[in-house]
Amino acid sequence: MTAAAPIKHQHASPIEIFRERCEARATLCAAGLMTLQDAVDGMQEVAAAQGLVATHGQDAVQEILAESFARWQYE
């Protein structure tokens, strides 16, 4: 019997986790459970607090926000 190779776990980078959180917030907005303004403002605060703005720049954070929330149509 041969031993199975150990599973290597790759952890998501903080910017990828931020992207996923933005997507989740966008779905909450689309479902009417959160306002767009609250969602975007909250995620901007998260990006600043976690050092993503300092590390990746405001433009990169803004691009992620725009891409995530642009998938949904708000009226």
Image: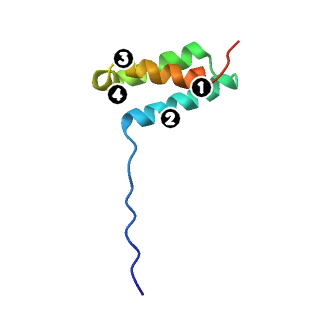
Q: Pointer 4: what residue?
A: 50
Give the residue at the far bottom of this rendering: 1
Q: Amino acid at mark 3?
A: Gln
Marking on residue 20: 2
Q: CA distance from mark 3 to mark 2?
A: 17 Å
Marking on residue 58: 3
Q: Is residue 33 visible?
A: no
Q: Are marks 1 and 2 in contact (CB under 8 Å)?
A: no
Q: Pointer 1: what residue?
A: 26
Q: Are marks 1 and 3 in contact (CB under 8 Å)?
A: no
The mark lying in front, picked from 4 and 3, is 3
Q: Amino acid at mark 1?
A: Ala
Place of residue 61 in the rendered image (x, y in percent of width and height, measured from the top left): 41, 22
Q: CA distance from mark 2 to mark 4?
A: 15 Å
The mark lying in front, picked from 4 and 1, is 1
Count the numbered circles shown.
4
Residue at 38% x, 71% y is 5
Q: Secondary structure at mark 4?
A: loop
Marking on residue 52: none
Q: Amino acid at mark 4?
A: Gln
